[in-house]
Amino acid sequence: MSGTFVGMPAFPKAAHEAVHNSTLRGNLRHATHTIRAKRANAVAEVSDWAALREAGKQIKDHTLRHLDRYLVQLEESVTAAGGTVHWAADAEEANRIVTRLVKETGESEVVKVKSMATQEIGLNEALEEEGIRAYETDLAELIVQLGKDRPSHILVPAIHRNRGEIRDIFAREMSEWGRPAPDGLTDTPAELAEAARLHLREKFLRAKVGVSGANFMVAETGTMVVVESEGNGRMCLTLPETLISVVGIEKTVPTWQDLEVFLQTLPRSSTAERMNPYTSMWTGTTNSETADGPQTFHLVLLDNGRTDTLADEVGRQALRCIRCSACLNVCPVYERAGGHAYGSVYPGPIGAILSPQLRGTDSEIDSSLPYASSLCGACYEVCPVAIDIPEVLVHLRERVVEGGQVTREGNKVVLKPAKGHVAERAAMRAARWAFARPGVLRTGQRLASRTRRLHPRSLPGPGKAWSDSRALPALPSEPFRDWWQRTRGGSGKDGGK
Amino acid sequence: MRVALFLTCVNDTLYPDTGRAVVKLLTRLGVEVDFPMAQTCCGQAHYNTGYRHEAEPLARHFSDVFGEYEAIVTPSGSCGAMVRELYPRMGERARAEGRGNTLAATLAPVIPKTYELTEFLVDVLGVTDVGAYYPHHVTYHPTCHGLRGLGLADRPRRLLQAVKGLELAELPGADECCGFGGTFALKNSDVSAAMGADKVRNAESTGAEVLCAADNSCLMHIGGTMARLSTGMRPVHIAEILASTEEEPAR
Ligand code: SF4
């Protein structure tokens, strides 16, 4: 994934700062709670929501099971419609392909539609190195780009910024990139939007090359689908002569009819809209008789860990994700830790299960992500394709502590258990041993009860993490089982006192 | 009806009052309660921390201990969810690992007859008014595994509404997690504590003196936070409220 995230500390360390940053906490709390309530209303309006959710899950599962076949069909359809298909095994290859394609046009700048796949591979940075400037045109992406910041949300990448901060970024940075912000810019939404509109318009009208992702790729016709709210996508997809789309292979759907499901569930889940304002679809190039796209169209199909993820029976459900971000908006951990703590362009619950699969669990951040959840299940409840995120989190925890077989670059490899879990593993084994022997448990309980006056009010070592913010429970004078044995539940000798 | 009380290792060790309350309540409702002395732990903490294979012997032990009973009642939403939701998955995973059907078959008998306490009262015994008396101002926190795992829905609230003298206050943001999450509370203690503090602030805003839930693990975290924030509120398990009567009132 993007080079900007290399060397991220483990999640708890990264979250520590965010938790204690009251501006950030306030921004996130306000934003997530607002969209949370709106989504709930938008979903409640649809009487067959449960059926749509199940249909979305099944369409995706079916497609993933036969992905080999549908990808070949997709390539044939795109080619027949005048487009060119490129296959990229990883980020580096995808970046190389896109850079070469842009260079071949002789251009040194591109306009971009918001795309998770190009962020995942760090395309902007790769283009920059080759002297090509990529302009983000989605409002929130623009804020992130101008602020030399990192995205913290899938849909609203600048969710961590408030209006005042955005005003300052515009006033300070716009002139660096093109048309400066108007004098006396205030932080009213209308003025901020107008400043962005003027700044971007210049880029749209000039650009010869557009770069996008896609929300869906229809295999039967080779049609690309982008859904968005601002119209910047429509501009990027229609004005430039050359369009390069970088799309993860899991975005394939077999037929147009399948879109019927997702075009209902995606907008309601992401922006709480009944329908998103702009749905752009194009098939190949204008040169072909049947098609309606740009003059030149390139599709770069991105793997980057997806085939490996597909090989995992439990983990593969993460590939059903349609990037609606509903799981982020309901997540109590995301709300407090913020998006940056996840060390990836995919933050929140989906990031916690996707990054350790796409990137592996070797780094500090990736091996800590499966634990960045209280397993409360709110994400699973709202997910429009029913990804059981808690199930995958627990599965990945198992991978971290036990190791085991995984697929890496198409090869089966056996992972060793991660370091740093030695004491925990020993404690878990000891607990299992004691719990398998009721007598041992009882001896321990009695010993604790008898020495209870000696117990400290706060704990040293790992227990400090508990007692710093929470008082310890007082130990009872006897465990329940002793009382039960004495009294048989109140019917025994001392009447249950 | 003869049922087994699965108290859970946490309650047995730290919250015997909850166990006594369940026994008192069920006995009052004409249920014969047994506490199989060989019981220990359902394996939830092991499973959820990634030690599924360490949890397997505990699940098998659970099945040995409780397999013979007509019904198994537990005053813990999360341990109830462990048996009902995750035991089937453990069986499936063992099968997927090529270890055959043995684990699934061993665990199968206990899965459908394990009930969380409020579920057992409302669905099996068919009561919502259990004849309780508790003259206090109470707010109810539906714990995540009870709410989303077991789907307890409004059962606990219906039971509380029927308690004489009890004034029930709506908890703002009730369905948000309290931040306990087992080992999450230690591994991500900053976020966990922030979630706990928000939960406690919401509870305080109701003006209630008692925060009630159907799971002592969450109450241990919420109560510990209340004590550190010196709120004057106290955590009470729902069983203790439902067991309380005019003759023998709980505090
Ligand atoms: S995991 Fe589900 S809820 Fe989260 S972004 Fe993906 S589709 Fe949306």
Image (cartoon, rainbow, N blue to C red):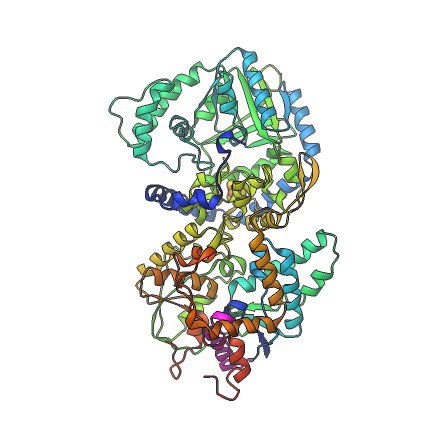
The boundaries of the magenta stretch are B13-32
Q: Residue furthest left?
A: A184
Task: Between residue A408 and residue A426, name the one nearer to us.
Answer: A426
Q: Main SS of the magenta segment?
A: helix
Q: Quadrant of the C terminus of chain B?
A: bottom left
Q: Horizontal placement of A463 versus A410: left or right?
A: left
Q: Quadrant of residue B165?
A: bottom left
Closest to the observer: A414 or B99?
A414
Residue A67 appears in the rendering = yes
Answer above or below: position of A379 versus B114. above
With A169 as the anchor, is B120 left or right in this view? Answer: right
Q: Residue at x 57, y 12 (%)?
A: A104
Q: Residue A147, percent across and down?
A: 38, 28
Query: What number of labels is visible?
Result: 0
Residue at the spot 54% in from the left edge and 68% down from the top edge: B9
B191 over B121 or under it: above or below: above
Is residue B107 on the magenta stretch? no
> Which residue is located at x 57 percent, y 70 percent?
A441
Residue A42: give x, y in percent of width and height: 45, 45
Magenta highlight on residue B14: yes
Residue A300, position in %: x, y?
A: 60, 24
